Image (spheres, rainbow, N blue to C red):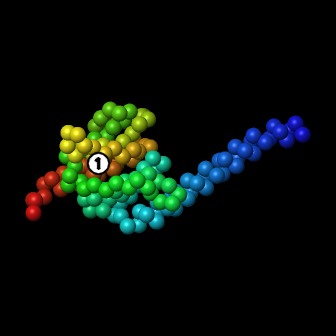
Amino acid sequence: MERGLLWLPLLAVFIWLAWQGWNEYQKVEAYQNWAKQFERAKYDIYAVLAQNGSNLTWGKPTRQGPINLETFSLKDVQSIRLLVDEKPVQLETPPSKGRAIALEFVFDAAASVRVPFTEIPLAVQWGKHLQQELQRLQLEPIE
């Protein structure tokens, strides 16, 4: 009986890990269904981000699909910054480590949107792509 009591916490941990894996799988499946409507999309545990033309949509992933969705246009963005540990860094020379990673889209002096990322390389890839899109949009003539 003592051995059984020793194994009980291990069984509880195994059940918890299995539930966490199933929960994450459900989030990814819901994300994949949601992302079909966009040209480009990314998923990580902090946020989903998708692009359709010059419009970006982002939100929080859940098992039922992304929630708290916000949409904005790159045409309204003045600059894009990569933040690592709440400090702006260059997209060309990002640090190799950092905890709090986000792309910040600055609209004007008072308004900005921060989209969190789990990995610096993924944030850099998206930042470079969106920076090119922003530059292309700024060069287009206004109709």
Q: Label 1, on which residue?
A: 128
Residue sitting farthest toward the right: 1
Residue under the image location 18 percent in, 56 percent down: 137
**Residue 34, position as x, y percentages in the image:** 43, 63
Along the line of sight, which residue is nearer the eye, 143 or 67? Answer: 67
Q: Amino acid at mark 1?
A: Lys
SS for dot 1: helix
Residue at 10% across, 59% down? 142
Q: Position of residue 130 (x, y in %)?
A: 27, 51
* In the depicted structure, whether residue 108 falls above or below residue 21: above
Front-most of residues 96 and 133: 133
Q: Is residue 120 left or right of residue 12?
A: left
Question: How many other residues sit within 10 Å of disc 1, few (<14), some (14-19) or many (≥20)?
Answer: some
Q: Image quadrant of residue 143?
A: bottom left
**Relative to residue 103, is residue 66 drawn left or right?**
right
Asked if 117 appears above or below 40 in the picture, the reply is: above
